[in-house]
Amino acid sequence: MKGVYLVTDRELCGTRGVAAVVAAAARAGVCCVQLREKTASTRRFMETAARILALLAPQRIPLIINDRVDVALAVGAQGVHVGQSDMPPETARRLMGPDAIIGLSVETWDDVLAARHLEVDYLGISPVYATPTKTDTKEPWGLAGVTRIRDFTRHPLVGIGGLDASNAAAVIRAGADSIAVVSAICAAEDPFGATAQLRETIEQALEERGEKATLEGAK
């Protein structure tokens, strides 16, 4: 998983709605979409997830459900992202099966140590920088933290927290494989253009790191 990882926020999407923002980002080439619905009812969460899943299916962009394994299973989403206080990733794996994408947030070095031998598909480094969209996290990792985790773990890394086109390249060069963003796309006047700019930035940074930038998603 390399590229632009969109995490949704209903409030930041505003009157355009989540589906319209996701559609624009998908056209610009996100590698995956995480649907995050902290305040929605279970039924509304499921309805939104089913709509987004259908929207992403033609482009084969995976849908990751934040926290809610039950919603992911109910709609047939490709994966789930869990935090340190959510369902254990081992249980999520058992319920969702060997082919599901399981992501895990790591907020402290103890979290990183505990995740070393877990069968998860990526670690979400949370937060890289302080961010107003997520206030219940530990101290920011910074670039040095990203590099420290990269040197320690075999897992792919997704950086999240305070990221946009101005600092994404530095985080990729520090060792992240993907850049997860919320407001940089959801609150953008032009979600398509914002995604395309991020994608180009990440491609260039991967090439500078000596990796072939074969990013998922349409150009």
Image (cartoon, rainbow, N blue to C red):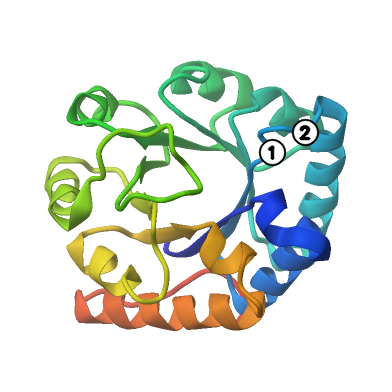
Task: Please indicate whether residue 205 sits to the left or right of residue 39 in the image.
Answer: left
The x, y position of residue 113, in whole percent, is: 19, 26
Is 93 placed left or right of 129 in the picture?
right
The residue tagged 1 is 37
Q: Which kind of residue does numbered mark 2 sit on? A: Ala
Q: Position of residue 141 (x, y in %)?
A: 22, 46
Q: Quadrant of the C terminus?
A: bottom right
Q: Secondary structure at mark 2?
A: loop
Left or right: 3, with 12 as reference point: left
Q: Residue at x 32, y 77 (%)?
A: 212
Residue 1 appears anywhere in the view: no
Q: Quadrant of residue 36?
A: top right
Query: Left or right: where does residue 102 sit relative to residue 153?
Result: right
**Where, by quadrant of the figure, is residue 118 drawn?**
top left
Q: Are marks 1 and 2 in contact (CB under 8 Å)?
A: yes
Q: Which mark is residue 40?
A: 2
Residue at image position (79%, 36%) is 45
Res 17 seen here: yes
In x, y percent, where is residue 77?
Answer: 70, 41
Helix, strand or loop at label 1? It is loop
Task: Give the amino acid type for the residue marked by disc 1 in the picture.
Answer: Glu
Residue occupying the point 20% across, 53% down:
142
CA–CA distance in space, label 1 to label 2? 6 Å
* Quadrant assignment for the N terminus: bottom left
* Label 1 crowd (10 A; few <14 / some 14-19 / many >=20): many
Seen from the viewer's position, the closer of residues 66 and 2 is 66
